[in-house]
Amino acid sequence: MSTSKAKVLIAFDFDHTIVDENSEPFVFDKLAPNGIPDDIKSLYNRLGWNEYVGAVFAYLHSKGTSVDEIKKALYEVKLTAGMKQLLDLIKSEGLEAIIISDANSVFINELLKKFNLTETFSTVYTNPSKVEENGLITISYYHKQDWCDLSTVNMCKGHILDEHIKTNGGYDKVMYVGDGYNDLCPALRLRKSDVVCPRIGFSLKKSIENLAPPHELHARVVNWLDATELLQVTKSLTEKD
């Protein structure tokens, strides 16, 4: 076996993966305990999640909710069990980690700062959001895609993963850690030398188990609930085959 380390990429989803909540609905439930108006709820089915999130931010702003109040609610989100140990290992081993998430940049960046994880990830791919001068948080699409039936219009995670790999000259091994149906596309793009890690109790695991032609999974599957269950497979990635 070669003594040189393999070039490794570990890609993470964010909600229900790095953190144990779905951050946007978690915050909305805290700040609108009586619920979101039906006309805003209907936007999700008609126009998609991003449009819904943008409308909820506008609704909260119209009710006088401040950015500080939003951040206070956001800071109640906790890391998934074992995730700190896993990310500490990744950092100590000098492995490259990225985030590919359908959340938004304001929320992810705030939580990474809170958990002192900003330097752990080389890149964060997510829907751009910003705080306007009047205190309104606005959100836009990461991109607009029409090529992937497994993905929403605003984000094909598989395409993002492929582009990152190409831009960085390829990797010996890739590990993808996620939970949702929108994590299936990147999982299907992995090779036999790669690993996909679906979280137990969420839809990615079921989607992989129910996979049917023409879709085919090549990567090794390591299911997990507590992220410490991924420590051993992460250590093994550094070994060249």
Image (spheres, rainbow, N blue to C red):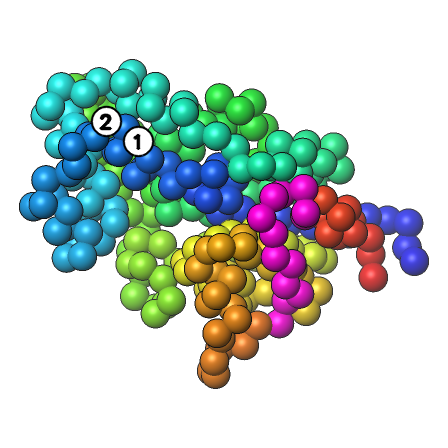
Name the residue located 78 percent from the left edge and 52 percent from the top edge. Answer: 236
Three-letter residue code for mark 1: Val
Q: Which mark is residue 31?
A: 2
Residue 229 in the magenta stretch? The answer is yes
Front one among 156 and 199: 199
Name the residue located 52 percent from the left edge and 33 percent from the top edge. Answer: 79
**SS under mark 1:** helix
Three-letter residue code for mark 2: Leu
Question: Is the N terminus in the top left, top right, bottom left or bottom right quadrant?
Answer: bottom right
Name the residue located 22 percent from the left edge and 18 percent from the top edge. Answer: 66
Q: Residue lying furthest left in this view?
A: 39
Q: Residue lying furthest bottom in this view?
A: 213
Residue 193 in the magenta stretch? The answer is no
From the top left corner, tell me how far across and down residue 119 is, in percent: 58, 28
Give the residue at mark 1. 27
Q: Is 60 situated left or right of 30 in this image?
A: left
Placement of 52 over or under 161, stated as above or below: above
From the top left corner, tell me how far across and down residue 148 is, in percent: 36, 67
Placement of 19 over or under 147, stated as above or below: above
Magenta span covers which residues?
A: 218-230
Q: Is 51 situated left or right of 175 in this image?
A: left
> Marks 1 and 2: CB-CB under 8 Å?
yes
Residue 123 at least partly seen: no
Q: Which mark is residue 137?
A: none
Gap between marks 1 and 2 measured at Cα: 6 Å
Name the residue located 18 percent from the left edge and 20 percent from the top edge. Answer: 65
